[in-house]
Image: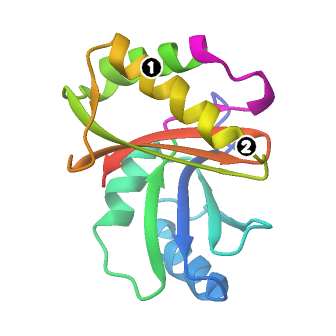
Amino acid sequence: MNSNNHERDLVLIVTCRAGSEDWCEEEIGNRIFHKDPEVIVLKTKYQGLLLVYSKLHPDTAYKYAKSYEYGFVEKIIPAHIIINNIEQFNFEDSKKIIAELLTEKQLTNNVKLKVKVRGRRGLSQHVWRAFIKAMKEHGIRHDPSSPVCIHVEGIDDMLIVGVSEC
């Protein structure tokens, strides 16, 4: 979190069906507004993708957002770790991220890895391989049936990592 209380951090990535972004923006904005009246929900240039900025901690925003039924919101991902220059992302970064997630999120030995990179052709495979290798080095196995997901979302120059229910 930023030390300046007037600043808002990226706390959630929200997806919805393409074409329903306005409704999705209203739904998630209204929900988070109850905890943070200064919440900002931004549409991106990618259809069905919104970013939520708030003073709330990502876990607080995620738990509160997930406790509600939506008509248009499809997926909510907490933004635990943000790398602002995706071009410089490397294997060492993925090792540090996995180590941090192990410490802060008490990951089990089996998690599902989900990687989606927008705006950077061919980078998804590089990111996938780096995270799989880092997970193995830390004794974590990719398990497609795990109820816990590590989401790695690339959006233009940002790489955002969050742990949540699958």
Q: What element carries label 1?
A: helix
Vertical placement of residue 24 versus 81, above or below: below
The image position of residue 48, as x and y in percent, is 63, 74
* Disc assigned to residue 122: 2
Count the numbered circles shown.
Answer: 2
Tell me which residue sits at (64%, 83%) in the image.
18
Spatial separation of the CA atoms under disc 2 and disc 1: 18 Å
Q: Earlier in the sequence, mark 2 or mark 1?
A: 2
In the image, what residue occupies the spot 27% across and 48% down?
144
Q: Give the range drawn in magenta.
A: 80-92
Residue 3 at x, y = what percent? 63, 27
Q: Foreground: 95 or 23? A: 95
**Label 2 close to label 1 by CB (< 8 Å):** no
Quadrant holding the C terminus: bottom left
Q: Which residue is drawn at 24% across and 25% down?
A: 106
Judging from the image, what secondary structure is the residue with disc 2 in?
Answer: loop
Q: Where is residue 111 in the image (x, y as percent from the top left)?
A: 27, 37
Is residue 112 something that shows in the picture? yes
Question: Is residue 10 one of those drawn in magenta?
Answer: no
Q: Which quarter shows the N terminus?
A: top right
The three-letter code of the residue at mark 1 reads: Lys
Q: Mark 1 points at which residue?
A: 133
**Which of the 4 image quarters holds residue 100?**
top left
